[in-house]
Image (cartoon, helix red, strand yellow):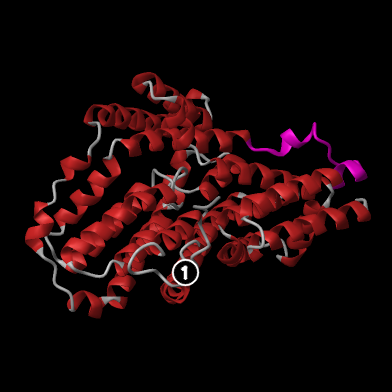
Amino acid sequence: MNSAAAFTSLAVFVVTYALILSGRLQQTLAAVVGATAMILVGVAFRFYNPHTVAEVIDVDTIWLLAGMMIIVGLLKRTGFFQYVAIKAAKWSKGNITSLFLVMSLASAVLSMFLDNLTTMLTFFPVTLSIAEVLGISATPFVLGEAIAADIGGVFTLIGDPPNVLIGSAARFSFNDFLTHTAPVSLPVLLLTLAFLVFRYRSSFRSQSAQVSVLMQLDERRVLESPRDMTKLLGVFALVIVLFLVHSWLDISPGLAALCGAALAIVFLRPKVEAVLESIDWELIIFLLCLFVVVGGLNRSGVLPFLARRLSLLGGGSVLALALLFFWGAGFLALFISAVPATVAFVPLVNELGTLGIATNPLWWALALGIGFASVGTPFATAANIGVMNLSRHGNQPIRYKEWVTVGIPVFLMAGMLGSFFVWFGIQTGWFF
């Protein structure tokens, strides 16, 4: 390992992540600056060049995210998600606690299959409208939905970008997540909802909803195109089936998502603007640049060196390493957000695999640790940031302190329960 190259690439990595954390530059712009610097350093020290950069980019991750964004974006235009939110609210029949639970559960379920940001961008205005007509505070409901969405995203391969990144790197299937992260996330979700109901019990008891107003809401009015909605739901169902059987068909999850996006385009024939607007280009560019930054760190020899040190630190114990990844990545995600934390840890797991260490438990610990940490702070995920920004335009802005006083206890509870499952999964062989 060239010491000068390693030190310089590490400096670029640290500065890039410091810029992301500090907020001095918007995170995507910080990643662009970092990627450019890493390529220049790589060219100078001859461990990287513009032609080999493409090799460090996980193309299947980009395909999966872009394909699902197109399908979900087109489905959102039909009014389907607003329809679900209003329908869920009416099922509560005006009981405040039931309304909170139903809306939070609906948010969690949708986030198992959609990006959390899309879920919250849809639920937020509907929740505000429902709270306004019922004369109740929207803050507990918005926080409950956001936290439930973060946990719901841990259930499946496509529920959250970190899972997409981990699934692609580890070659895990949709079914693998259903049998490993979903059984852990379910009790965490139920415990979280019980805690939130207890936390806001006095607020729920002191408010009374206008049931007649709630039941008069007509969810059918929000549907812009029922026919297109039916077609897209059919495409979405087909994509889920492809995710379940993709290993049998020898296709990647990313290709399955692209197939669904192509079918949606053929069936609906939307304008090109509608398709392009469905894709979160900021996230795509952010990921591409982080791949380049972390890839340079790997090529310079820093990550292999760290992997060897981690192996010695863990004494060869898979359980010790898994718990280290679970909490280490989780705490990192609290401050720099889940996606860059995931991108930083994924190559470390791969390097540990080259040393003969079983990596499956490490992948599951990483997915659970980062997923549960996403509830802790307002900037741990793009969805959380989106909720905070949207709330500033309303009558009841959510304050940083208010989020943290709820999110950190939930993170710690989820962390303790998740740690038990990591231990149990390794001891029983479930996580291998």
Q: In this image, 289 relative to 388: left or right?
A: right
Stretch in magenta: 41-58
Magenta-colored stretch includes residue 223: no
Tell me how many marks there are.
1
Q: Secondary structure at mark 1?
A: helix
Residue 139's spot in the image, x, y percent?
32, 68
Residue 47's spot in the image, x, y percent?
87, 42
Q: Residue at x 18, y 77 (%)?
A: 205
Magenta-colored stretch includes residue 47: yes
Residue at which label 1 appears: 411
Q: In this image, 153 relative to 358: left or right?
A: left
Q: Is residue 228 above or below residue 103?
A: above
Q: Is residue 37 above or below residue 225?
A: below
Q: Amino acid at mark 1?
A: Phe
Label 1 Cα neighbours within 10 Å, binned few <14 / some 14-19 / many ≥20: many
Residue 1's spot in the image, x, y percent?
90, 51
Q: Residue at x 62, y 46 (%)?
A: 286
Q: Is residue 79 above or below residue 262?
A: below
Q: Residue at x 49, y 52 (%)?
A: 430
